[in-house]
Amino acid sequence: MTHIPPPAEELRFLDTELGQLDARRAQLLARRAWLIHALYPVPAPRPADVRRQPETTAPSVQNVLLILGGILLTIAAIAFTLVSWGHLGIAGRALVLGALTLAALGAPAPLLKRGLRSTAESVAGLGLALTVLDSYALYEVALPETDGLGYAAVASAVLAVAWAAYGLTLGALVSAPDTGRLHLPLPLATATAQLPLLLWAGAAGAGAHTVTAALLLTAAFDTVLALRSPVKSVRVVATVGACVMGGWGTFAAGWLSTASGTSAAARAAALLLFAAAIALTAAWHAPKPRVGTGIALTGGLISVAGAGGVLRSSLPDTWTVPGYLVCGVALLAVLHTRLPEPLRHGLARASGCVQAVAVLWALSTVAIALLGPVDWVRSAWSGSPATARDAVTTELPWPPNAATAPLVLALVAAVLAVAARGTVSWRPQALTGALTLVWATALIIPAAFELPYAAGLLAQLLVTAALVAYALRSPRLPTLPAPVPLVALCLSLLTSLSLALLALASRPATLSVLATLTALFAVAARQSRLGPVTAPASLGHATALACAVGAALGWPSQQTALLVLVVPVAAVLLAARLGASPTTLSMEVTGATAALLAVGLTVTDPPMLALVLALCGVIAAGTAVREDRRPVGYAAAALFVLATWVRLASWDVGSPEAYTLPVTVPALLVGVIRRGKDTRASSWTAYGPGIAVTLVPSLFAAWGDTHWLRPLLLGGAALTVTLVGARHRLQAPLVLGGTVLALDALHELAPYIAQVAGALPRWAPPALAGLLLLALGATYERRIRDARRVREALGRMR
């Protein structure tokens, strides 16, 4: 019977056979290749057979040769015209130049039909250059008495028209689809067209306004070509010409607008408006929206410069910036028209740029109004100034022509407020900007109008109250103010700080302003969402009020510190009442800062410093009574210790035990209470700090004390602590007490050890050391076992 394997086994068998066949085939192919190589060896290529790659392409070589040929022919024609012209007669001159020009201009047509475009371009360039030489020869022979600039203007215009006609005609005559028209005549005609008007104005001796008008007319012509020409090269040349001529003409018109006189300013404004019209026309028909927006922005700025120049020449210098600003705001009228979107956006951005520059101009007065009162810190209560401007310009001068700065800020604020009503996406930003500018306007009005000093104080106080009221009435989230109310609150704090500094000029003003600000922010702190900001502000002004009251009463700084401590007391009481409110932490931080100020005021008086530290400890202890403020108890203990040490130092007490024992006793009592409530508490945590704070300083003092009483008392105390630790199996008292007892005993035996060491011979110490080492070596194992037992015994203690 025939055995048929399973399909999987048969497939494995076939794969094995095929693999063997492939391996055999590879061996046979390798042998065949070796035999062929042995019978028919291939010679190695000689170096001469290796061809180098060309470093340039054939079209590049062709173009270089044609360009060089055209340049050489042009140079030869120029040399012939300038040097050899006089050797020929009139007929010969006309015949030579005419024949050369006609031949050069006529040759490109058959060359283009044969597909020789590059050669045709070179010959055409030669022909165009010969036309320039023809015009020069005509001037030298037939019109030598004619004005040079006038002839150049006419010649450039004729050449521009002739070259353009030549390029267009040649393109129409050549009908081969693969050749097209020449690239050179039309761009050259466009470039030459930049000269006629400018040369004509120079030939006519025109003034600056006429030359500027010629530049702008040329720019307008270039703009039309750039927008309408179907030839790309013409558009590129026309765009460059429009930018250069238009920029030159606009700069010249702007320079002319600064001249004095209404008539000159009006003519310059007309030129600027013409330049703006060119730019806006280009923006209207720009192929890309972004390009159109940028050109419209430029046109808007030019139009503002023109209209504002007329207003500047007819108004006083104080109204220069408002005049330009009004012109800039007027550009926003296009937003409600049906003009293309790029045009509207560009003009709106131009208006924004003008408004931003006007605001920057007015910000110098805002900076002076804010920073000027800082100088009153050095000359507090030296007398009230006459006006609000005198109060803020003690060191900084008031900017010239700044009387209209409030009007500028108010106008921009009104624009932002109106813009916020019509938009939704950036309404918060617009409202924030409007609010800030209104605040800045109100801040500088007293100084700008030179109101009386008291009126300036009242105005800033009203601004602060209005900002706080606005922040309070804004319906927002209960804990997180929105951007606009938050900005209003920050501006109110900034205004209150400036007002407090400004009030330093007079004692009654200082006291009344600080009291009012304290009450104002205290009322605002009742709102939970504003409390984290207004409550610290109220406490800060209260701290300044306490210092001012102490100074008004004639108290020294150390006595004023007691009045300042009222602030942290109030902060602690209010924080305890508020509980877990977001305002609690900010109030406590402000109270702690006031306490630090009180401590700083008493640094020069140790007894008063000790009293203030103790009172701060009481305040901290009162804070630690709350469950969530238990860690403040450590600060209270530290303050009490510091107060005790400062008091003892003021009494000239030199013994360290006088400083340490008042700490040790309550610390040990606290440790006993802690161990009574928590039996798992370690003796190092409960008793270690209290024991170490007295034993360690006393040990250092005993080592430097030659009297016997301190070491005796220290040894007795250390022995007592050691016995107590051994009795109750407490690790910290046993280790600390035993260590101090051993070191104290060593200090007492040190003189006798020194005497014995002096009486022994020189060989005795080495001998004793050797015996000691031998004894230790002999009992090493037993000592290790004993040490292990001691360590285990100590480990079982707590």
Image (cartoon, rainbow, N blue to C red):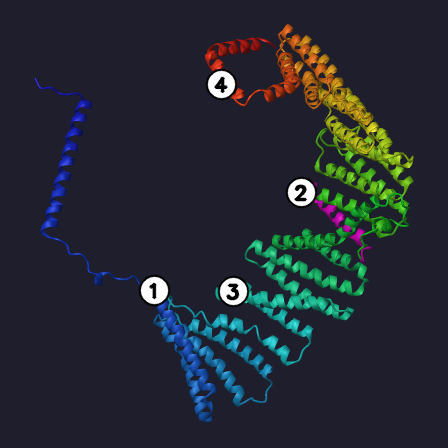
Q: Main secondary structure of the magenta part?
A: helix
Cα–Cα gap, marks 4 and 1: 100 Å
Q: Going 9% across and 19% down the picture, which residue do you hit?
A: 2
Which of the marked residues, 2 or 3, is nearer the chain's N terminus? Answer: 3
Question: Does 605 sit above or below residue 221?
Answer: above
Residue under pointer 4: 770
Cα–Cα gap, marks 1 and 3: 28 Å
Which of the marked residues, 4 or 2, is nearer the chain's N terminus? Answer: 2
Residue under pointer 2: 426
Q: Going 87% across and 38% down the picture, which residue do you hit?
A: 513
Q: For numbered disc 3, what is the local secondary structure? A: helix
Cα–Cα gap, marks 4 and 2: 92 Å
Which of the marked residues, 4 or 1, is nearer the chain's N terminus? Answer: 1
Where residue 240 sits: x, y (%)?
A: 55, 65
Residue 662, picture quadrant: top right
* Mark 4: amino acid: Gly
Q: Which residues are magenta?
A: 400-428
Of 371 and 362, the residue lying toward us? 371
Q: Is residue 677 left or right of residue 544?
A: left
Residue 625 visible, this angle: no
Residue under pointer 3: 236
Residue under pointer 1: 57
Which of the marked residues, 3 or 4, is nearer the chain's N terminus? Answer: 3
Task: Give the quadrant of the C terminus.
Answer: top right
Magenta stretch: includes residue 679: no
Where residue 770 sits: x, y (%)?
A: 49, 18
Which of the marked residues, 1 or 3, is nearer the chain's N terminus? Answer: 1
Residue depth check, mark 1 versus mark 3: number of the one nearer the observer: 1
Which of the marked residues, 2 or 1, is nearer the chain's N terminus? Answer: 1
Cα–Cα gap, marks 2 and 1: 58 Å
